């Protein structure tokens, strides 16, 4: 007879703890990260309410100033012994433009460094990143140079243009882009009003799969689905099979980049080839 204790999985991040700065009203990023994260990796969200980009260029463009609510979130994360943090907001990266990601990583690292007396700092070797940097790294690792950009139906025209310009400015040659058709129920609303009317919580992935499969141009050597609030990871594996090309999403790319830079190389099945690299 023994007195062994059986322990259930409690999702404790003994291999890595990753902090996400996410849009305050969104549920998709956490749901998708928890679906994909391997064992021993925990995900912790700080919700941010701020206009895009979440860090503003200074007048002389020598650096950026973090939004007040982002600074609040940094103070909370600073004591949590995190392995990595990611500004998980596609819009901030593409609107911020070339150079914004690096400037923001520097500002985040400074804000996450010294903690209050008696608490623990972010930790030696911990990394900060952005969704823009993560998607660029994922595209390079997947050998994609001519991505087909797929963007959420709630992205207004200026954000769509900023996204195309962002990836072009970083040396890629987008083969085209698609703003998802939201369907008859939502089509009469301007893109910027869709989220406020609840579309973010009523997303369907089957129409997205059909639209990408129909619209992806033959010259594209991969697909990038932007927007961390854009529900899509359930279709990545199927799309790769159907298109015969890498399919990368915003949340998948950030998880992969944070895992690899935290030293976690466990392959994850079912969510696209990137998480097996």
Image: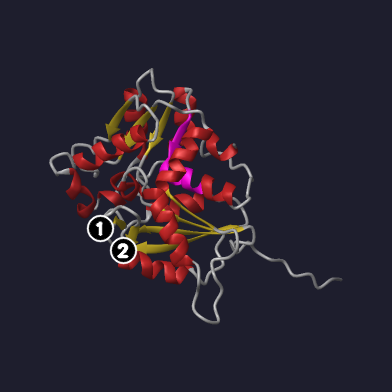
Name the residue tied to disc 1.
51
Discs 1, 2 touching: Cβ within 8 Å: yes
Q: Residues within 10 Å of mark 2 (few under 14, many from 20)?
A: some
Nearest to the eye among marks 1 and 2: give it: 2
In the image, what residue occupies the spot 27% across and 40% down?
162
For residue 177, what is the image quadrant?
top left
Direction from residue 183 to residue 79 in the image, left or right: right
Above or below 211: residue 16? below
Q: Position of residue 19 (x, y in %)?
A: 48, 60
Q: Quadrant of residue 179?
A: top left
Q: Residue at x 64, y 62 (%)?
A: 14
Residue 145: x %, y % from top left: 43, 27
Magenta-tinted stretch:
246-255
Of residues 273 and 94, the one nearer the viewer is 94
Is 252 covered by the magenta stretch? yes
Report x, y in % for residue 70: 36, 64
Q: Magenta includes 135?
A: no
Given residues 29 and 116, the one toward you in this image is 116
Tag shown at residue 67:
2
Residue at the limit of the structure toward the right, as seen here: 1
Give the Cα separation between the discs numbered 1 and 2: 8 Å
User: In the picture provided, is 179 more to the left or to the right than 20?
Assistant: left
Q: Secondary structure at mark 2?
A: loop
* Circle on res. 104: none
In the shown orientation, is residue 10 left or right of residue 74? Answer: right
Q: Helix or strand or loop: what does disc 1 sit on?
A: loop
Helix, strand or loop: magenta stretch = helix
Q: Is residue 65 above or below residue 156?
A: below
């Amino acid at each position: 007879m023994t007195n062994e204790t059986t322990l259930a999985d409690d999702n404790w991040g003994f291999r890595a703890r990753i902090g996400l700065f996410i849009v305050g009203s969104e549920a998709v990023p956490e749901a998708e990260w928890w679906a994909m994260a391997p064992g021993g990796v925990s995900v912790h969200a700080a919700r941010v309410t701020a206009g895009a980009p979440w860090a503003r260029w200074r007048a002389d463009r020598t650096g950026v100033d973090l939004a007040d609510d982002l600074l609040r979130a940094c103070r909370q994360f600073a004591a949590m012994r995190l392995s990595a943090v990611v500004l998980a907001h596609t819009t901030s990266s593409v609107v911020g433009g070339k150079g914004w990601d690096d400037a923001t990583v520097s500002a985040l690292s400074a804000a996450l460094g010294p903690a209050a007396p008696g608490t623990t700092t972010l930790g030696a070797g911990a990394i900060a990143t952005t969704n823009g940097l993560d998607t660029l790294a994922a595209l390079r690792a997947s050998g994609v140079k001519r991505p087909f950009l797929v963007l959420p139906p709630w992205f207004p025209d200026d954000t769509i243009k900023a996204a195309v310009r962002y990836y072009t400015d970083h040396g890629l040659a987008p083969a085209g882009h698609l703003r998802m058709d939201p369907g008859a129920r939502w089509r009469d609303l301007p893109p910027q009003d869709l989220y406020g009317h609840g579309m973010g919580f009523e997303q369907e992935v089957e129409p997205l799969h059909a639209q990408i499969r129909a619209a992806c141009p033959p010259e594209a050597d991969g697909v990038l689905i932007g927007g961390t609030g854009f529900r899509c990871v359930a279709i990545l594996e199927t799309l790769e099979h159907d298109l015969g090309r890498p399919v990368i999403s915003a949340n998948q790319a950030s998880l992969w980049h944070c895992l690899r830079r935290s030293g976690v190389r466990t392959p994850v099945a079912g969510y696209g080839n990137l998480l097996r690299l």
